[in-house]
Image (cartoon, helix red, strand yellow):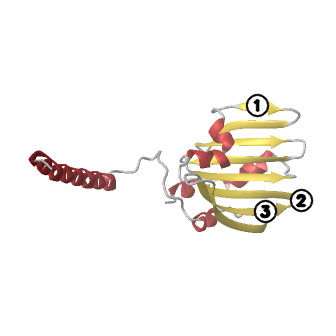
């Protein structure tokens, strides 16, 4: 080893240690970018926010974490409600702002442009809209009277109602509107 190498190696190592510790301190003190993925809340944090619709029977409820891949997953809490032959599943989910996770459970909101309305023959209507200032979408199939209504809060949380033998799309929307979207968006 030459004299130059003996002097250069310790200086390089010291610079590397300084740079690494400097980056670490900056990463800890820098505010989180609101568009970057974050840790998921537990399903137990979502469950209390499920609606309690008057006149409906809660048939079951639950929650879990779904892992699709190392980067893609979400937590959810859901409940199935029944009334007069109608059956609706309401789900609240946290995607941690992961675009793939969000695309899995809120596909229409993520993929359709604002204000979109389209028809799929014979009797399905798809609409992209705003619900109390948050992006939302609906799908209604008048043939079998089934559909879904979904809203995305803060590019992270999803409130979704989907059902069969429903009297109208308004019923699905009303169930989503019973969710306190502000509280949902404030979860950490």
Give the residue drawn at x 73%, y 63%: 79
Give the residue drawn at x 83%, y 48%: 146
Dots 2 and 1: beta carbons under 8 Å? no
Label 2, label 3: how far apart the Cα atoms are: 10 Å
Give the residue drawn at x 49%, y 50%: 37
Q: Which mark is residue 81?
A: 3
Most extreme residue toward the left is 3
Label 3, label 1: how far apart the Cα atoms are: 29 Å
Q: What kind of element bears circle 3?
A: strand
Label 2, label 1: how far apart the Cα atoms are: 28 Å
Which of 21 and 168 lies nearest the eye of the viewer? Answer: 21
Dots 3 and 1: beta carbons under 8 Å? no
- Res. 176 in view: yes
**Sequence-earlier tag: 3 or 1:** 3
Which of 39 and 69 lies nearest the eye of the viewer? Answer: 69
**Sequence-earlier tag: 2 or 1:** 2
> For mark 1, does the 10 Å Cα neighbourhood hold few (<14), some (14 to 19), or many (20 or more) residues?
few
Left or right: residue 60 compared with residue 64: right
> For mark 2, does the 10 Å Cα neighbourhood hold few (<14), some (14 to 19), or many (20 or more) residues?
few
Q: What kind of element bears circle 1?
A: strand
Q: What kind of element bears circle 2?
A: loop
Q: Which residue is mark 1?
A: 118
Q: Which residue is mark 2?
A: 85
User: Does residue 126 sit above or below 6 in this rendering?
Assistant: above
Q: Position of residue 47 (x, y in %)?
A: 63, 66
Give the residue drawn at x 23%, y 55%: 17
């Amino acid at each position: 080893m030459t004299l130059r190498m003996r002097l250069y190696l310790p200086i390089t190592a010291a610079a590397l240690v300084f740079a690494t510790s400097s980056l670490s301190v900056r990463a800890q003190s820098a505010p989180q970018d609101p568009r970057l993925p974050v840790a998921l809340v537990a399903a137990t944090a979502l469950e209390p926010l499920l609606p309690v619709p008057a006149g409906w029977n809660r048939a079951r409820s639950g929650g879990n974490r779904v892992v699709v891949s190392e980067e893609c997953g979400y937590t959810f809490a859901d409940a199935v409600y029944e009334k007069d032959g109608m059956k609706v599943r309401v789900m609240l989910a946290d995607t941690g702002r992961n675009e793939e996770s969000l695309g899995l459970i809120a596909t229409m909101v993520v993929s359709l442009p604002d204000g979109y309305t389209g028809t799929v023959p014979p009797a399905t209507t798809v609409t992209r809209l705003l619900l109390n200032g948050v992006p939302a979408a609906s799908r209604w199939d008048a043939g079998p009277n089934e559909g879904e209504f979904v809203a995305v809060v803060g590019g992270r949380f999803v409130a979704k109602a989907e059902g069969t033998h429903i009297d109208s799309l308004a019923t699905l929307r009303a169930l989503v509107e019973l969710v306190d979207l502000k509280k949902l968006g404030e979860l950490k």
